[in-house]
């Protein structure tokens, strides 16, 4: 039996993903959980595993294509599988009257096979790299035997993030609900089974052709009328894009199933509208050109180049960053605290150690010293390593120091974090920083490296900045921005001017749980460890 691997819309904002690389080819035999493809979702580059063992029969997308939700990604032939419909008919029929029951069934099948066929398909929850491994079944919105339409809500489930509704991917009759209310639904496992009727292809093709032919003159007639406000089939992300561009979705021809509108359909529609309006603009501008040709000696001619605006949809990591930053600023009262660090002695220490301890696997930069000293200071000020709940009634002090670092990758801003800095040496922290930096810049950061951060560092100085007001990486309560290291004149204890290595640091704190005095005292301790590296060594355990 051949099964399609389908990417469903499970309410996490994933409506499409870019096919970066196929890790198998058609005809390959795969085992369960074997990586099949690298895809770029809204958050990171992740691998999609095989939910079944079998032989890959078809890859539905080419490298670089955008894979759609509700559409098959690839097909796999499962060896030794038994058709679901035949299994259920055998299981539900009584033993004695088998011959009597099956005769009318066979007759019915024979009469209807010429026009349609019925199959039972499973709706699977796949692992698509968003950290979702299970979800609680809160409420079924349908019952077994109910007829449902495509995109009709089937169930309310509670994921790790929110309560969402799962829609039907196809129209049909609900054959089986695999979970009861309150149970945990697993990824790679069927959520429900749906009985789908497949119509004969020839009549369908004829109907579609007639519809297209008849629609052509209608479109010409209605082109002069105001845009109708009909209901279009599209995801919320597509609707937001249409609203932002002031485009009526009912006017956009959808290329998806049943006319579903995708983002590229909107882009194509907008570009088509620009091309239609271009000739009239050109005709208007040709008139003065003809006049100037008649009086070339009086007015010199000039050529006006028409430039069209470029519209690029915000998606992937950039879309997630935009959503998270808006949520952080709108829900967290930020305040900023700035300080100046004299890192002359630390720079000298690092230069003396760099040649001996740096390698291809370990780059001994300044960042390991910043992280380790921050971890030592967090032990004295645990509120800086805490998290507050949504309604600000509980404060959780995190035992692990998982310090994140903002990386400007080719796919957008990523903030991987080094786990358990409090238990690592400076060289171990440096090795982790090197690994995560290389992974982030190639876009191949594992989801586990992006989760469970407790405090973040943004190194704007690498790009030349000095002072910033960073936005807190929710649900953390603090973030610091490091400015560039500058050689500046400063007075020493004797009143003499010296060249010192100076860096500006800018903190943003959550004013619901952190006050100015706390962040100032914490920053002073952190500054002491960095300006006097011997103090850092004495504080280590």
Image: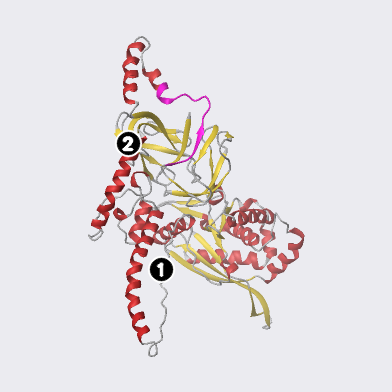
Image x and y of residue 130, in percent: 48, 46
Mark 1 lies on residue: 308
Q: Is residue 178 visible?
A: no
Position of 421 compared to 180: left or right?
right
Residue plotted at (41% across, 32% down): 121
In contact (CB < 8 Å): disc 2 and disc 1: no
Q: For residue 128: magenta?
A: no
* Residue interval drawn in magenta: 71-87
Q: Residue at x 57, y 33 (%)?
A: 31
The color scheme shown is: secondary structure
Going from the N terminus, do you reach mark 2 or mark 1 first? 2
| Dot 1: element | loop
Residue that label 2 marks = 203
| Other residues around mark 2 within 10 Å, as few (<14) / some (14–19) / many (≥20) | few
Left or right: residue 495 compared with residue 257: right
From this view, report whether residue 172 is shown above or below residue 132: above
Of all residues, the one furthest to the top in this rendering is 96
Q: Using the image as rendered, state which of residue 234 and residue 321 is in the foreground.
A: 234
């Amino acid at each position: 039996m051949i099964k399609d691997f389908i990417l469903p819309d499970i309410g996490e904002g994933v409506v499409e993903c870019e096919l970066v690389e196929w890790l198998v080819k058609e005809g390959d035999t795969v085992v369960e959980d074997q990586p099949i493809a690298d895809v770029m979702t809204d958050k990171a580059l992740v691998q999609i595993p095989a939910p079944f063992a079998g032989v890959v029969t078809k890859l539905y997308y080419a490298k670089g294509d955008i894979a759609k939700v509700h559409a098959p990604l690839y097909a796999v032939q499962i060896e030794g599988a038994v058709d679901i419909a035949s299994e259920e008919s055998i299981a539900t029929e009584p033993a004695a009257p088998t011959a009597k029951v099956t005769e009318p069934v066979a007759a019915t099948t024979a009469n209807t096979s010429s026009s349609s066929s019925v199959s039972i398909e499973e709706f699977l929850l796949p692992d698509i790299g968003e950290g979702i491994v299970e979800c609680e079944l809160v409420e079924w919105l349908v019952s077994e035997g109910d007829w449902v339409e495509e995109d009709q809500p089937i169930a309310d489930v509670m994921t790790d993030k929110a309560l969402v509704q799962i829609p039907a991917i196809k129209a049909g009759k609900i054959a089986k609900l695999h979970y009861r209310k309150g149970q945990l639904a697993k990824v790679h496992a069927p959520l429900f089974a749906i009985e789908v009727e497949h119509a004969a292809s020839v009549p369908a093709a004829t109907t579609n052709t007639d519809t297209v032919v008849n629609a052509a003159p209608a479109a010409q007639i209605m082109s002069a009328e105001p845009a109708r406000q009909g209901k279009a089939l599209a995801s919320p992300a597509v609707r937001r894009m249409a609203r932002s561009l002031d485009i009526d979705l009912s006017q956009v021809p959808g290329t998806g199933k049943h006319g579903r509108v995708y983002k590229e359909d909107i882009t194509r529609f907008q570009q088509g509208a620009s091309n239609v309006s271009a000739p009239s603009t050109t005709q208007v501008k040709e008139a003065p050109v003809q006049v100037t040709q008649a009086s070339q000696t009086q007015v010199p001619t000039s050529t006006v180049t028409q430039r069209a605006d470029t519209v690029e949809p915000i998606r992937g990591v950039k879309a997630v960053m935009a959503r998270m930053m808006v949520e952080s600023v709108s829900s967290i009262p930020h305040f900023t605290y700035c300080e100046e660090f004299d890192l002359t002695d630390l720079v000298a220490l690092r230069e003396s150690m760099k040649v001996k301890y740096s390698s291809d696997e370990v780059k001994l930069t300044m960042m390991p010293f910043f992280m380790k000293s921050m971890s030592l200071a967090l032990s004295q000020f645990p509120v800086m390593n805490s998290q507050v709940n949504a309604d600000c009634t509980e404060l959780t002090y995190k035992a692990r120091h998982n310090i994140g670092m903002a990386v400007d990758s080719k796919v957008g801003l990523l903030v991987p974090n080094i786990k358990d800095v409090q238990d690592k040496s400076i060289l171990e922290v440096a090795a982790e920083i090197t690994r995560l930096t290389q992974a982030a810049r190639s876009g191949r950061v594992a989801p586990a490296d992006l989760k469970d951060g407790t405090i973040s560092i943004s190194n704007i100085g690498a790009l030349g900045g000095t002072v910033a007001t960073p936005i807190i990486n929710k649900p953390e309560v603090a973030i610091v921005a490091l400015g560039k290291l500058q050689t500046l004149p400063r007075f020493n204890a004797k009143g003499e001017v010296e060249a010192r290595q100076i860096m500006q640091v800018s903190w943003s704190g959550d004013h619901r749980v952190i006050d100015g005095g706390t962040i100032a005292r914490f920053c002073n301790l952190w500054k002491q460890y960095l300006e006097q590296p011997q103090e850092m060594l004495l504080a280590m355990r």
